[in-house]
Amino acid sequence: MTDIKTQFDPILRNLLKNKNKIAIIPIGSIEQHGPHLPISTDSDIVSKVAKKLSDKNDYLLLPTITYGNSFEHAPFFNLSIKESTLRAILIDLCTSLLENNIKTIFIINGHHGNLKSIKDIDLKIRKKLKNKVKVFSLSYWHFMDKDFDHAGFVETSLMLAISKNVKMKLAKKGLITDKMTKQEIIKIGKLANKSFPKATKNGIWGDPTKATKKDGIKILNEIVQNLSKKCQTYLTEDSL
């Protein structure tokens, strides 16, 4: 793994003479995650996932874009950028990577609210750059067995595995969907996309009270393993 931000120009330029270098752009968010997790949670988790993925496959790791689209969390704290802004940043970064001879890029997403920004972004970038760059966007939670949550069991376990900045004594249950019908979950999900506090009351989707570091390590390893397989599949299919 090569962490771009720690490199020196002459060494990096020499390294990039290799035409097969692959880059990872992690994207997260700054937003409330209940009283027990820091507002950097999404960015922290995706940064760790991207680092482990880069280590495993010798990819180039770019600094995490720590701001995302989180307006739906208001009036709870969030620092947000527009969908179009995030999309423009990603397109500009991919353009710049191409200018530095990096032609294969994985965008690893760590925040649900960013999905609209990265939808079909591979097609947009390929069109703009005349098919000179290959871009693949992946959201890490699609690569684990457990259902995605927000400051619930999964995210809290992951944070316990990677950070000391977790206050488990303040952890409280949030919105629990176990007894809801599929239609009810879809309905409240749509409400959450507009106003997360209205849907969850306390800003938590799930139950973080039983989260453990051990579970977090297990989930993290599962994500990285499955993500790595998917990346390799994309690369193999694209080379055929």
Image (tube, rainbow, N blue to C red):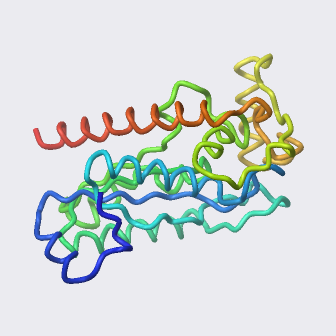
Residue drawn where x is 58% and y is 56% of the image = 44
Image quarter (top left, top right, bottom left or bottom right) of the C terminus: top left
Towards the viewer: 201 or 131:
201
Task: Give the vertical position of 7 relative to 108 (above or below).
Answer: below
**85 or 169, nearer to the observer:** 169
Q: How many marks?
A: 0
- Please give left or right for residue 113 compared with residue 97 in the image: right
In the figure, 39 relative to 237: above or below? below
Q: Is residue 132 left or right of residue 196?
A: left
Query: Dividing the image into 4 quarters, which one contains the N terminus?
Result: bottom left
Q: Nearer the viewer, residue 149 or 88?
A: 149
Q: Position of residue 49 (x, y in %)?
A: 46, 48
What residue sits 45% from the left and 70% below the top? Answer: 88
Which picture quadrant has residue 171? top right
Tell me what residue is drawn at x 35 percent, y 57 percent.
24
Q: Position of residue 207 (x, y in %)?
A: 78, 32
Vertical placement of residue 209 versus 15, above or below: above
* Percent x, y of residue 124: 35, 59
Q: x, y percentage for residue 136?
A: 33, 49
Q: Is 105 on the left or on the right of 81, as rendered?
A: left
Q: Quadrant of residue 98?
A: bottom left
